[in-house]
Amino acid sequence: MGYILVIEDDLSMREIMEMLMRAEGHKTDLADNGLTGLELALKNDYDLIISDIRMPGLSGLELLKRFRENGRKTTLILISAYATTETAVEAMRYGAYDFIPKPFRNQDLLAAVNSALTHRDVDQERQALVDNVKTHQRFGGLVGSSPAMLQVYDLIVKAAMTNTSIIITGESGTGKELVARAVHDNSARADKSFVAINCGGIPEQLVDSELFGYKKGSFTGAMTDKQGLVTLADGGTLFLDELAELPLPMQVKLLRLAQEKTYRPVGGNAELTADIRFIAATNKNLETEIMAGRFREDLYYRLNVINIQLPPLRERPNDIPLLAHYFLEKYSGQQNKDVRKLSTYALDILQRYHFPGNVRELENIIERSVALEQSNIILPESLRLADFKRESLGPNPPSDPQGPKFTEPLAPPVKAPSLPPEPLGGTIPVINPPVAPTAPTRDPVAPPLSRLPAGDLDDILASLEVYYLVSALIAADGRRGLAAKLLGISPWRIRVRITALGLSHLESQEMANIAPDLYPKPPLPLELAPDWAGESINLDKYLQNVELRYIFLAMRQSNDNKTEAAMLLGLTLRSLAHRIARTNYDKEAAKLAILEGYPPK
């Protein structure tokens, strides 16, 4: 129930509103003019103020203006028998919650009052959460006080107060599932189930039955009915991790569930309903996946109502000490060890480290260091950084008595190995192998990352595709159909790409006059990715050649360790396996090895 002030100069109307409010259980004060009402409003802490607009002495709009100028934020509803659009707009501009014209029905006023009080409660809860976050530097399982993380916390709180779908984006290891849980735990569904599924961790043929369940006898081994994760999440939240890995047929079924709230178990005939809030996460660019035909555009727009972008750890280095001490306390307790702090030099090393694995990698480093540390402090030499990533620390060892000295990497990256001259868009030619190749021509002790061009594979491919797309549009005088022919792709695909770039509103002439330097080609060798020369090309072949060469370099660099190769390329292990199969890597890699002077395996 609320504490409400009614300001109304008409006695009968004032008494009617008083009876209505008290019948609903609200405590009510009355004022018969604007000046008296303003005095009461500034003196008492009301939950809601209801005021007429036309009153002697002080109008409702002037009362609202002075009230806000005094820094008061109490929710206020204005009523008037002289309602106009201009009056309503002015009332909203000054911060009125609602505007109700006279005469009004009793139920309309009561509905507005209940809505305003609910809005006040939600706003107060949200502010309390934000204040708590700023004070304690934590939110749910998330830790950090940088401006970027405070923005994330604020967006979580706002999203939690709604029931809309969310997509959380960010690099692997940034804490996307923690964000999803924080949204759920602070929402109206907090007392219901939070069900998580890793879309990339379930075999494609089992995704359907895992999500939607199955009926007895629907396939061999289905001895009983089984509920799917959708049923378990009914009334709560379904978290879809690695959304981009969901097979296309399942994307169709998920779209129907998101739109219609209905689904059908495997082998079932009846449509079932489910009230679910969808939260999805991905470390991929879904717009790029849409362009490549691997993700449905309609599902993207259905789920991407609110987007929460998580910053990588390297972009918020001031949060590293907070996170490191948080994990130190956590794992010291779990392992029953008295490791109390990190040395200044150890923290300096952590703050300079690039952290490709983000917060998950930092947690792993601290857990491992606590487990192996014999003293009560973690020193620089105690940090167990991955050997193949130590390049980011420079050549000076952490144990230097003068403290760590950070310099540039041991050697600058060199250009990617070039493909042999060949027709544009062609495949790598079969070449008779030289007689008894004995050793690679490259220095085998070169720094681990010096042979792989910078940037994640998907980012390189996306930038290269955009470069050729814009170049083709300029060469075709902005005519999209001709640009599609120049690239060897369908007009539909080029339309999707233009929309993703935000260029769909441009006319042909504007397309033809796009500044080329706005969409530069990534720094790749000309033999691998030639500059646009105005001729027709096979865009898919170009991109596949680049993709194949990157996989080749990553596999060579990691000694064919697919887990390390996937990390170097910024891919999931499943995605790398898919690309190896699609590019016929095992066959093409042997040719590349010969061309580059490596002994074939």
Image (cartoon, grey):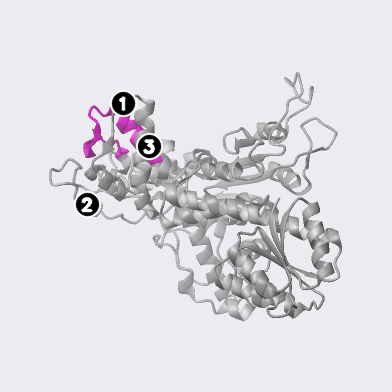
Taking 265 as reference, is 566 above or below it?
A: below
The magenta stretch is 361-387
Q: CA distance from mark 1 to mark 3?
A: 13 Å
Labelled disc at residue 327: 3
Q: Residue 178 placed where, x, y %?
A: 52, 42
Q: Residue 21 placed where, x, y %?
A: 77, 57
Secondary structure of the residue carrying numbered label 3: helix
Labelled disc at residue 406: 2
Q: Quadrant of residue 350?
A: top left
Taking 579 as reference, is 527 above or below it?
A: below
Mark 2 belongs to which amino acid?
Phe
Q: CA distance from mark 1 to mark 2?
A: 31 Å
Residue wearing tag 1: 337
User: Which of pointers 1 and 3 lies earlier in the amino acid sequence?
Assistant: 3
Q: CA distance from mark 2 to mark 3?
A: 25 Å
Categorize mark 3 by other alpha carbons within 10 Å: few (<14), some (14-19), many (20+). Answer: some
Residue at image coords 47%, 44% = 142
User: Which of pointers 2 and 3 lies earlier in the amino acid sequence?
Assistant: 3
In reply to whether residue 453 is colored magenta, the answer given is no
Work out which residue is located at the far left of the displayed protein and give it: 401
Categorize mark 1 by other alpha carbons within 10 Å: few (<14), some (14-19), many (20+). Answer: some
In reply to whether residue 375 is colored magenta, the answer given is yes
Please state which of residues 341 and 584 is positioned toward the viewer in this rendering. Answer: 341
